Amino acid sequence: MPTRRPLDPVGPKRMVLGGVVGAKRIAIVIAAAVTATALSLPGAASDVSNIARASTGTRCGPDGPWFNTRQAINRRVSELLSCMTLADKVRELYGVAPPTSSSPVGYVQGDAHLGIPPLILSDGPAGLTDYHPDTEPRPATALPAPVSLAASFDPGLAQSYGKLLGTEARARGVDVLYGPAINTVRVPQGGRNFEYLGEDPYLASQLVVSEVKGIQAERVAAQVKHFALNDQENDRKTTSSDADPRTMREIYLAPFQAAVQVGGAWSVMCANNEVNGTYACQNDQLLRAILDKGWGFNGVVGSDYAATHDAVASIRAGLDQSFTLADWGEYYSQLATLVTDGKVPVKLVNDATTRVLRLMFRVGLFDHLPSPPPVNVQADGAFARAAAEEGTVLLKNSGDALPLNPTNIKSIAVIGPYAAQAYTGGGGSSHVLPYYTVSPVAGLEARFGSGIQVTTADGSSIPAAVALAKSASVAIVIVGDQEQEGRDRPNIDLPGNQDSLIASVAAANPRTIVVLNTGAPVTMPWLDSVPAVVEAWYPGEEDGNALAAVLAGDVDPSGKLPETFPVDLAQDPAHSPPRYPAQDGVYEYSEGLDVGYRWYDAKNLTPLFPFGFGLSYTTFAFEGLQLTTLAGGSVQVTATIQNTGGVAGADVVQVYVGDPPSAGEPPHQLKAFLRVSLASGSSQQVTFTLPAAAFSVWDDTTSQWVVPGGTYDILVGDSSRQLPLTGTVGVSPMTLSDGRS
């Protein structure tokens, strides 16, 4: 029978796969309520919604009218709010230490008197993290890193990715998931680039909308992060990211706007850094003017951990919930006193509490929800494998080195630090303890069977690796970088001896395949000496099985680079201060709109691999571009893609728009894409409708989205540098009321 959400979904009796829920939370809530009674301020007459508890009767008891699911959420929120004291309200606005653990988890106290359960928040951009260990860490499905999801260019996959996150969160009693993370890959060595969705705002926008919908369909709130311009990790808590309004709107804020207005995200996390000299979590321009008033956001703004610096400034700017590790509740626990002292209007506390309660009702905290099913480890692992396969990018394949042909292979040498261990993800808050892992060696052994010998060496001894490579039919060298929250990489070279390892193995065996487990670009001084290179990112728990399927040709590698790979850092726009690293405490975004491929196109630079690039085991051709102007300033783009190779495969049709010179935009920018799977010899006509927003720019003078008007280039192909179909279309000038939603 469906039952009301238990008051304690995090007790020690919960089984690792969900299903059995402990009972400690009831006692915790009662204790919290006793504390709250001691903190109540019945004399604060300025609170217009009952500083003193309204009554001890049914109306304001643990079975109040807000439990009536037939009422609209706003009515239920209003009824509950009217029964809350000032202390009750304040208690919902800050995180406290989890009751049975000191781990950094988002935990907001409940109230047994009003039947309010605690609110549980957990990290989860790449899988549910162990948010509340009792005696041992709890596992979850370790998905491929979000950068791999971005490489799929597949919103449908993103929605399924979000659904898996939502179902596992719900099974564990989590109400709010910290993610998706949608900061822009501005600096190639950024420590959290693996958590993000690439360098292009349109790509990130399309994916985050789908992922948010997938998460929230499971009655779990997505908290998109980190708002805003937290695009590098070094000194993130002590520096300011300074950018002009147009650059912010068109590049860095666009995915957040899409997440809120199209995805309907119920929560947003403000970042640790300052934005134009003001901390993000007390930045009125970001939180009030843009997020709330501009985009109509009515969800909760929660702080990143330790991102609150001043309670008065933060709540005035629009921060609803504060979380910190230094002293739990350090800032917002003072709000009741600040209200009675006249420093904070009680209306701000009421508004923030209203948002928090609205989120609680949205996730079903007060509803009679069915008990969630336990996690299906096998099914979720199968999805993790499929997602890793789809995100794999084939960067080089000379002489048809891939796929591997078992008829002419007797042995495979798997070499490198990630040969015998799965690379499940980067470091920091997004790291997942997987249910299980499949190493590359294990995956290759399972795929190729006993007829082909698979041997391995970790590469720590280059002479030993060379000897092994010489004795094998094929050498597969698996190398990677080490991205970590809280610090950027010192450069984009592979760490340690890995470049030397590849060069030495390639000299010993001409059939050397390089597999990159990286979260971002790396230099490749050995590129010309190897026939094939595969970018597998951080593939998650099914690493080995996914890799074996791609190398064997069971799966066509059809991923596309969601970020530009430079030849070296000197090519990148942010390669020197004050752009990066910061100078005098400021990262200057003076490259403006020229981020990623936009910079390389504007400066006519040839990167190592361009944005949107990715090979296949087959080939594709494009023809038949047709452009039609529609009502309202939109343009219909039609083209035909054909699989001209000998095997089935997939490609991503990409549509770019080049603005007239007067618009002051980069040479061309991604405005539409579609992943297409085709059998050998088959073709498909694809049609895109570019809305007027695809031709719009942000006008700093009027603070509006405008279409400059004029002649626009339309370019179609399968990477930012492979656009064989081109045409032009005339677009009339106009002003848009809502340019990027």
Image (cartoon, rainbow, N blue to C red):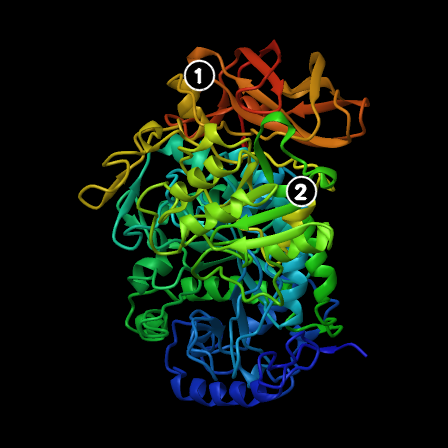
Residue behind mark 2: 550
Residue at left 53%, top 82%?
111
Look at the picture and state if 103 lies above or below 402. Answer: below
What amino acid is labelled 1 in the image?
A: Ala
What amino acid is labelled 2 in the image?
A: Val
Look at the picture and state if 275 lies above or below 75. Answer: above
Nearest to the observer: residue 181 or residue 525? 525
Specify the label residue 11 is tagged with: none
Name which quarter of the figure residue 202 lies in.
top right
| Image position, residue 677 (x, y; %) | 75, 32
Does residue 125 appear in this view?
no
Name which quarter of the figure residue 366 lies in.
bottom right
Element carrying mark 2: helix
Going from N to C along the chain, the mark reached first, 2 or 1, is 2
Q: CA distance from mark 2 to mark 1?
A: 43 Å
Residue at left 80%, top 26%?
680
Quarter of the image containing the N terminus? bottom right
Nearest to the observer: residue 165 or residue 546? 546
Specify the label residue 663 is tagged with: 1
